[in-house]
Amino acid sequence: MAWLRSSGEAPEKGACETVRATQCSEFPVYVQLLRNDHLSLLYTGLPLDAFTSLGDDLTEDFNNGFHLHPRDQLLMTLMKLRLNLLQDDIAERFHVSQPCKPHNLDSRAESYCHYYGQNIIKFLIAVAPCGLIMLISPGYGGR
């Protein structure tokens, strides 16, 4: 199975070992899911070339503490936005674990929502008509 790369070259040596720390499969999930333009449009709403270009732009100076491949993180985000998949479904598809609930009782009390019967964190996101994200507020509890 070939890696999805705009240059068509093979992955760097050791790239699969880094990804294996979190994911079970040898290759990142985006390689398996985005095999053609139709599937890319289905899962992300973007043509395969646009996904590849966006992945290149976002990951050229990308460095974080996650072991999940950066393009898998992008695919996970786009799939959540486009398809509104459940977190359990996303975790199963990408071979990752679910986030843990807060163990701090104060945090749990502040984020508990009686209406939904679970802990919720809210963010205010302001988006301009042209699609530009103008503001993302700090998170606050679900009351």
Image: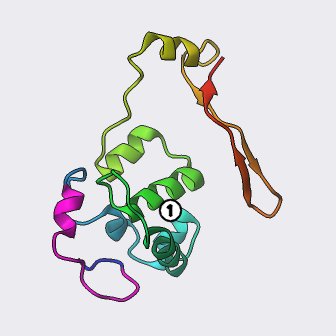
In percent of width and height, residue 65 lies at 33, 51
Place residue 47 in its image quadrant: bottom right
| Numbered disc 1: secondary structure | helix
Q: Is residue 2 above or below residue 27?
A: below
Instruction: State yes or no: residue 120 in magenta.
Output: no
Tell me which colouring the rendered structure shows.
rainbow
Q: Nearer the viewer, residue 97 or 15?
A: 15
Residue 25 visible, this orientation: no
Residue 18 left/right relative to 114:
left
Residue 68 left/right relative to 15:
right
Quarter placement of the N terminus? bottom left
Q: Residue at x 47, y 40 (%)?
A: 86
Residue 29 left/right relative to 50:
left
Three-letter amino acid code at disc 1? Tyr
Q: Is residue 104 above or below residue 72?
A: above
Label 1 neighbour load within 10 Å: few <14, some 14-19, many 20+ = some
Instruction: State yes or no: residue 9 in magenta.
Output: yes
In percent of width and height, residue 88 lies at 39, 38
Q: Main secondary structure of the magenta part?
A: loop
Residue 51 left/right relative to 28:
right
Counting labels gives 1
Q: Is residue 40 above or below residue 81?
A: below
Q: Nearer the viewer, residue 18 or 72?
A: 18
Q: Which residue is mark 1?
A: 43
Q: Residue at x 58, y 28 (%)?
A: 121
In percent of width and height, residue 34 lies at 41, 70
Residue 65 visible, this orientation: yes
Give the magenta-colored segment's residue range. Answer: 5-20
Quarter placement of the C terminus? top right
Q: Residue at x 19, y 57 (%)?
A: 20
In percent of width and height, residue 51 lies at 51, 73
